[in-house]
């Protein structure tokens, strides 16, 4: 009964602590935070200046004393102190007004996370003001968010492509039967676009520009009549500002290696899947979630290579958080999915 009261008054939270974006959910208000996982810090005074969307605008545009950093790398904590500050900021923003009790938080993590990395996530949440921190694996959360029958003795294949990692998992009976965590995802695609622009066009561009280019004309399959776009950056020979026009074919070539790495992760997972579960997967298909699911033609490419039916979630950016939120709302029903 006491824990139930804490759940009511503590305004418990579900959190998708991602490399690219952090999302928070509360039972009463739904998704309350969806902001970049970026923190702007004044290095001279060791003070946080901005967090989230405002801090992302600082990337590549700060003076020497200000650093705009992304404290999450490959889906796990790279800078403990700044991550704690970021979590605390988002908790305060999500829970407005007077807090009678500290909140309980459910946080989703990559399936390939180590024990040390798990402890870092839990400690960050506790130091940021949580009463307790529960962990759930991202593919499991994605499956729950997409309403897959995870409790049944059936094989469900999930591919969740986030900012830092791509998680492939076979799920059955509320557990992960096999998982493959590939530390190649949205960020790696952005870096691949940066390298391509540097090597082919001798043009230096920032991460934000590379991400915009990927979102506008990035693809995994040829797209007929795709427009060309202008990309602004710095000429690496003269040092002067310059603009070049690039096509969908250029960016598809730039993304070839990261897309192939993700496909290899899918094939490894399928190779390790027991025959009965493989039969279920062939009948039911694969769920595609995460921001990377929005890459044009990726579902078609995976379907062509694997000969599986690929279902893209209706809102792939929030699939994981929706599933994490469901476990928060009904912890007794989903008690078997927590990993700590």
Image: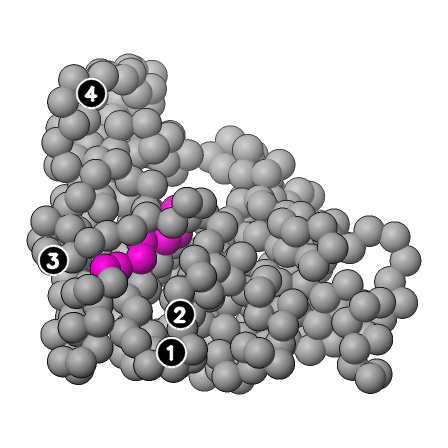
Q: Nearer the viewer, mark 4 or mark 1?
A: 1
Q: Which residue is mark 1?
A: 152
How many angstroms separate mark 3 from mark 2 (CA)? 22 Å
Residue at 79% from the left image edge and 77% from the top image edge: 4
Q: Which residue is mark 3?
A: 306
Q: In terms of secondary structure, where does tag 2 sit?
A: loop
How many angstroms separate mark 4 from mark 1 (CA)? 43 Å
Whether the magenta-drawn stretch holds residue 175 is answered as no
Q: Nearer the viewer, residue 196 or 17?
A: 17
Task: Point out which mark residue 226 bears.
Answer: 4
How many angstroms separate mark 4 from mark 3 (CA)? 26 Å
**118 relative to 64, above or below:** below
Task: Point out which mark residue 207 bears.
Answer: none
Residue at 87% from the left image edge and 62% from the top image edge: 99
Q: How many marks?
A: 4
| Label 4 Cα neighbours within 10 Å, binned few <14 / some 14-19 / many ≥20 | few
How many angstroms separate mark 4 from mark 2 (CA)? 38 Å
Instruction: Answer left or right for 115 relative to 95.
Output: left
Query: Sequence order check: which comes first, mark 4 or mark 3?
Result: 4
Query: Sequence order check: which comes first, mark 4 or mark 1?
Result: 1
Q: In terms of secondary structure, where does tag 1 sit?
A: loop
Tell me where the magenta segment starts and ends, as one range.
Answer: 285-292
Q: Nearer the viewer, residue 62 or 98?
A: 98
Discs 3, 1 touching: Cβ within 8 Å: no
Task: Point out which mark residue 149 bears.
Answer: 2
- Quarter of the picture containing the N terminus is bottom right
């Amino acid at each position: 009964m006491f824990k139930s009261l804490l759940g009511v008054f503590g305004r418990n939270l579900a959190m998708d602590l991602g490399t690219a974006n952090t999302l928070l959910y509360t039972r009463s208000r739904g998704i309350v935070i969806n902001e970049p996982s970026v923190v702007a810090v004044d290095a001279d005074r060791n003070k946080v200046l901005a967090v989230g969307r405002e801090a992302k605008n600082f990337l590549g545009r700060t003076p020497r004393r200000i650093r705009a950093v992304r404290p999450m790398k490959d889906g796990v904590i790279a800078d403990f102190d700044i991550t704690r500050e970021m979590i605390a900021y988002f908790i305060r923003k999500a829970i407005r007004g007077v807090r009678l009790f500290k909140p309980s938080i459910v946080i989703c993590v990559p399936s390939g996370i180590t024990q040390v990395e798990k402890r870092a996530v839990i400690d960050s949440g506790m130091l940021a003001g949580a009463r307790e921190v529960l962990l759930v694996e991202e593919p499991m959360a994605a499956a729950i968010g997409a309403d897959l029958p995870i409790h049944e003795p059936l094989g469900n294949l999930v591919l969740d492509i986030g900012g830092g990692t791509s998680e492939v998992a076979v799920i059955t009976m509320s557990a992960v039967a096999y998982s493959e965590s590939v530390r190649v995802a949205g960020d790696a695609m952005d870096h691949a676009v940066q390298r391509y622009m540097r090597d082919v066009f001798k043009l230096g561009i920032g991460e934000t520009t590379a991400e915009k280019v990927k979102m506008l004309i990035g693809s995994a399959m040829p797209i007929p009549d795709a427009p060309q776009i202008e990309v602004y950056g710095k000429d690496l020979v003269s040092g002067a500002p310059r603009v070049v026009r690039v096509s969908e074919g250029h960016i598809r070539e730039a993304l070839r290696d990261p897309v192939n790495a993700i496909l290899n992760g899918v094939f490894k997972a399928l190779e390790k899947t027991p025959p009965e579960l493989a039969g279920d997967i062939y009948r039911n298909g694969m769920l595609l979630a995460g921001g990377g699911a929005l890459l044009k033609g990726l579902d078609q490419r995976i379907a062509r290579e694997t000969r599986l039916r690929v279902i893209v979630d209706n809102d792939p950016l929030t699939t994981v958080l929706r599933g994490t939120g469901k476990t928060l709302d009904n912890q007794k029903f989903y008690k078997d999915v927590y990993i700590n």
